[in-house]
Image (cartoon, rainbow, N blue to C red):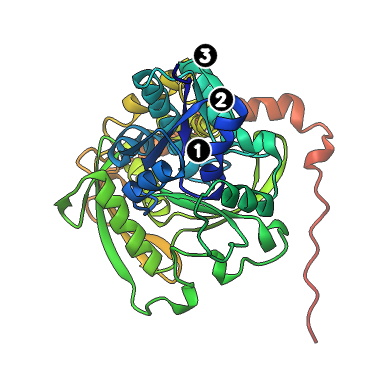
Amino acid sequence: MSRPKVILAYSGGLDTSVMVPWIGEKYGMDVVAFTVDLGQGEDIEKIRAKAVRTGAVDAMAVDARNLFVDYFVFPALMAGALYEGKYPLATALGRPLIAKLMVDAARQHDAKAVAHGCTGKGNDQVRFDVTFQTLAPDLKIIAPVREWKMTRDEEIRFAHKHGIPVEATKESPYSIDLNLWGRSCEAGVLEDPWDEPPEDAFAWTTDPRKTPDQAEYMEIEFEAGRPVGLEGERIDGVPLIDRLNALGGKHGVGRIDHVENRLVGIKSRELYEAPAAVILHLAHRELESLCLSKQAQRFKTVIAQEYADIVYNGLWFSAFHQDLLAFVRSNQRFVSGQVRVKLFKGQAIIAGRRSEHSLYSKKLATYETGDQFDHEAAQGFIRLWGLSQQTQAQKQLLKGDRNFDLPPLTAPKKVE
């Protein structure tokens, strides 16, 4: 009689490798290893083969980079979603996609459970579990790291006992997670928010003190809020992000040091590297400044915060997210054009922006010849604009309100 199957989110590292036999012993289930390529720069076929050697009854490797960019990264970019105004949500955007693909794999293999390697302290456990519970409430969720409480040395002994190859590499002092939209780094010396991050915590970006002394310019093209071109060339999302990561990293752009509020109730000091995300968010906001009305641009900031919270808090597959996305798509329909960005010494700087849908009119804004602004209308406008304040001041504010009683000005003392 065959045993029930479980789909395990498998990275090929020590934790997930140990999980393969551990789940078999603890739960009496056969493990199907599931690896997703989101641009983390690893050989997923090699990882798949290792899973089979480790004892998995089957192993799947899926290249989901295009899905990730088109259906997760770019919608979040269009929304302007930066958690607490800083974090581009790289890991947070990847988790619901991985969980959705795992549910699909569970249906394909008639599995009874899904499993992941998240700890009980982080946000990712919430993102995985909530997505599983939303899309497939019938599936059992197994989270070995929350259960076994093994130390690293104990895991290594367990691996040797079960014939699992353990690579003799020096353990990193940091906890790292990455995909093509960004790299996160925490733990070690980073746990003290007073300490400056050491250079060995960075991998994608050059120390700004060692970057080229000559600035580099690039032109990014957007259509309806989505980046579609670089340097006049039409380009798909994945290679566009890869190129911007390389260019931005060369100039030290994309370093983010963030003390953030985790969903589980603690503050955590996180170090992020996201050159492409930083460049694209900056360029996108500048294009919006041309193409959106004042009201639309300001209300969009409220939507951006709500959208970022939805992603960070693991509620991607909620009806509220669908509502927000519907607004974003409508809001972005005229956000098309080109933005020129300068990269120099750790900074991405806007050098120019243009759009055929631009609401900026030089004829109205200029102070030179050709000015078409009606200056005579300004006096009447100002009179009406200030009328309510003037009326209130005469009846209320000018009768001894101490908030407006400033001390008398005195002449500055002469310096001998």
The front one of 143 and 197 is 143
Q: Where is residue 262 in the image (x, y as percent from the top left)?
A: 65, 39
* Amino acid marked by disc 2: Gly
Displayed quadrant of residue 284: top left
Q: Is residue 33 depicted above or below 407 in this figure?
A: above
Q: Is residue 273 depicted above or below 305 in this figure?
A: below
Outermost front residue: 1
Q: Is mark 2 on a helix, strand or loop?
A: loop
Give the mark nearest the N terminus, 1 or 3: 1
Residue, disc 1: 92
The front one of 369 and 195 is 195
Q: Where is residue 48 in the image (x, y as percent from the top left)?
A: 36, 43
Q: Is residue 215 visible?
A: yes
Q: Which label sits in the foreground, 3 or 2?
A: 2
Outermost top residue: 138
User: How many other residues sit within 10 Å of disc 1, few (<14), some (14-19) or many (≥20)?
Assistant: many
The front one of 81 and 171 is 171
Return the mark for residue 137. Answer: 3
User: How many other residues sit within 10 Å of disc 2, few (<14), some (14-19) or many (≥20)?
Assistant: some
In whole angstroms, how far apart are the C-alphas of marks 1 and 3? 21 Å
Q: Which label sits in the foreground, 1 or 3?
A: 3
Return the mark for residue 332. Answer: none
Residue, disc 2: 28
Q: Position of residue 196 (x, y in %)?
A: 65, 67
* Amino acid marked by disc 3: Pro
